[in-house]
Every structure is written in structure tokens, then in C-alpha cells.
Amino acid sequence: MTFSLRTGSLDSPQPNARIASVKRQAIALQGVVRMVAQTPAEQALACSYTTGDGKVRFNVTELSVDHRPDRSVTLTYWLTVERRGLKEEHWEFALPWDDKSFLDVLTSHSPDPERLQQLVYIVRTLLEEWWDTKGHNRKSAKMGRQRP
């Protein structure tokens, strides 16, 4: 089953209204069900953000969460990456997630807030690590592809 969330930037004047206005939708696509705005974790993971040093902004245009029968998950991001003085880049990044210790947070409709923050922090750290190493680490390079 795949869950997908399309989002805009949370820097808009009413970010909570933007998230709250997203309604659940299910569309059958070649045997895969796509749901919009499923859980608080998926909403939090779909938020655009700027790295701590302020050098890179990851604008999340879409997040797909693919739940596998073995309880692993693949988070697929469609990103617009902005860096000062450089042209924006569009990327698709797939993060396989085999750690089942956060599965309850990812699927809960009311997860523990601290564990939710931990999950978001870990995923963003992995996203930034991929971004920094994709040019010289073959495994990282395979996780993403640049889009036109």
C-alpha cells in the first residue's frame, strides 16, 4: 500500500490551515492505493525545511510512503532543492526504512510527540547525508535521481 502526500511550503502565512485542509483521498493505481494526508508523521515528514546551517532548502513537493508486507517502508521524496547563488534542482529521493521501531509512530493517528520529533529528525538527517554524499558514494547515488 502506498500513501502519498502533496504539500506546499510551510513558510506560507497559514501552514497549519494548509495541512488541515488536505482531505483523505484514495485512488487505485495499478493495484496500489494512494492516500493523501494519512497520519501526523506523514504530514510532518512532508514539510519543507532549511538545513541548520541555512545553506540548503529542501522544498518537499510530494512524499510517498510505501508500506511493504514485511513491515518495512520506503519514503520517496520529490524535492526542489535551493542553494544560495545556484539554480534550483529537482530530485526524486527514495529512502528504504527497515527500522521497525518507528513503525508505530509512522502509522499512528496520534503518535507520541517526542517520538514523532525523533523520527522527523532521523529522516531529515538521512536526507541531508544523502544530499552531501550522492556525488561520491555509489550507494547514496542510487537512492536519488535528478529530474528536469
Image (cartoon, grey):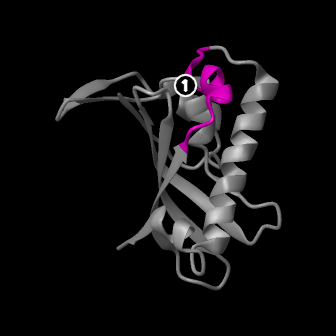
Q: Nearer the viewer, residue 116 or 83?
A: 116
Give me the residue at 67% from left, 72% from top: 132
The correct choice, above or below, for 23 with respect to 80 in the image is: above
Pinpoint residue 90: horizontal percent, then vertical percent: 45, 68
Query: Hey, which residue is sitting farthest left in the picture?
Result: 30
What is the span of residues highlighted in magenta in the rendered image?
97-109
Give me the residue at 77% from left, 23% from top: 113
Pinpoint residue 61: horizontal percent, then vertical percent: 47, 52
Quadrant showing the N terminus: top left
Q: Nearer the viewer, residue 72 or 5?
A: 72
Q: Which of 108 and 82 is in front in this view?
A: 108
The local crowd at label 1, few if under 14, some if 14 to 19, many if 20 or more residues have their Cα within 10 Å, is: few
The correct choice, above or below, for 26 with respect to 18 in the image is: above
The correct choice, above or below, for 60 with respect to 121 in the image is: below
Q: Which of 98 and 15 is in front in this view?
A: 98
50 to the left or right of 16: right
Give me the residue at 51% from left, 64% from top: 80
* Amino acid identity at mark 1: Ala
Residue marked by disc 1 = 20
